[in-house]
């Protein structure tokens, strides 16, 4: 029995009525397989290189992302910590401001109380302005006050030296005139003289009498005087150390306690 050497089967592909244009070999020789494999591997190498590069980039990006996330997390943590510190600082500042405001109010109240006590200590004193005076009269100020009270004001009962605790000059003698301050024995005597001060109106020496006021109340009088000049108020006066004003002749009197009260008169 003879054996024929088998030959590879050939498959012919036809397209319609066209002649065969290619022949596919089902069984390729070993060398051809190796060549095909090498060709495929050679073709894949650039793709593998690209894939490897992309993989490296992805790995690098993942690393960067991880680092970035860590930075972001740290930044958020730091920001949160700073915010908490700022919030606590803001709370502390707010509390300090509230405490400071409270302290200022307490100080203002204490100052007002002190000023009130100071004025109370002056309640038996009066100031006599534009009093004709020479250097020789400086030791006789009590007598000068008595003469003004009795001769110019007509006080009844008449004032005597014993009704005066103390009197002395304020400032200097200028143009033969000076200001005298006098503390009387009691408020009743002082008030009797003060209520008669209108009798000094139009006197030739231009003597006038005011209450002995604290520095703050003197400043209130100064500002009220300016308002009167500007026709913002009708009149102002003091009684027992308290300051009053009227917006017009028919209005009620207003007690002035502070500089803000004076400012309010400008806008009313």
Image (spheres, helix red, strand yellow):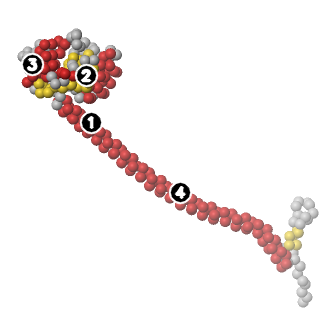
Q: Is residue 110 left or right of residue 39?
A: left
Q: Nearer the viewer, mark 1 or mark 4?
A: 1
**Mark carried by residue 159:** 3
The residue indicated by pointer 4 is 72
**Mark carried by residue 108:** 1
Image coordinates for residue 147, horizontal then vertical, percent: 13, 16
Q: Is residue 240 in view from this perspective? A: no
Residue at the bottom extreme, as displayed = 1
Image coordinates for residue 237, horizontal then vertical, percent: 23, 19
Q: Is residue 268 left or right of residue 208?
A: right
Q: Nearer the viewer, mark 1 or mark 2?
A: 2
Q: Earlier in the sequence, mark 1 or mark 2?
A: 1
Residue at the right extreme, as displayed = 19
Q: At x 36% / y 44%, what residue is drawn?
A: 94
Q: Is 125 situated above or below 25?
A: above
Q: CA distance from mark 2 to mark 4?
A: 82 Å
Q: Is 52 situated above or below 34?
A: above
Residue sitting nearer the eye, 220 or 103: 220
Q: CA distance from mark 4 to mark 3?
A: 92 Å
Q: Nearer the viewer, mark 3 or mark 2?
A: 2
User: How would you rate the neighbour count of disc 1 (Cα within 10 Å): few for under 14, some for 14-19, many for 20 or more?
Assistant: few
Look at the numbered discs 1 and 3 and tell me whether their residues touch, using CB distance below 8 Å: no
Q: Earlier in the sequence, mark 3 or mark 2?
A: 3
Q: Secondary structure at mark 2?
A: strand
């Amino acid at each position: 029995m003879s054996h024929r050497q088998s030959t590879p089967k050939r498959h012919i592909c036809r397209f319609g009525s066209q002649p065969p244009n290619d022949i596919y070999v089902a069984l390729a020789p070993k060398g051809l397989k190796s060549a095909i494999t090498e060709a495929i591997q050679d073709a894949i190498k650039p793709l593998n290189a690209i894939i490897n590069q992309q993989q490296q980039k992805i790995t690098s990006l993942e690393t960067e992302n991880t680092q970035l996330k860590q930075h972001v997390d740290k930044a958020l943590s730091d920001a949160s910590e700073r915010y908490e510190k700022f919030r606590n600082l803001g709370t502390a500042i707010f509390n300090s401001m509230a405490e400071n405001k409270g302290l200022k109010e307490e100080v203002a109240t204490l100052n007002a109380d002190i000023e009130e006590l100071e004025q109370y200590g002056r309640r038996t004193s009066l100031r006599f302005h534009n009093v004709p005076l020479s250097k020789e009269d400086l030791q006789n100020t009590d007598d000068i006050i008595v003469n003004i009270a009795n001769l110019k004001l007509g006080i009844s009962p008449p004032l005597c030296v014993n009704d005066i605790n103390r009197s002395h000059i304020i400032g200097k003698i200028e143009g033969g005139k000076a200001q005298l301050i006098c503390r009387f024995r009691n408020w009743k005597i002082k008030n009797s003289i003060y209520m008669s001060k209108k009798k000094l109106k139009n006197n030739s020496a231009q003597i006038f009498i005011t209450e002995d006021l604290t520095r703050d109340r003197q400043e209130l009088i100064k500002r009220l005087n300016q308002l009167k000049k500007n026709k913002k108020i009708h009149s102002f006066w003091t009684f027992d150390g308290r300051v009053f004003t009227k917006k017009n002749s028919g209005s009620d009197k207003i007690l002035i306690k502070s500089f803000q009260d004076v400012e309010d008169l400008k806008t009313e």
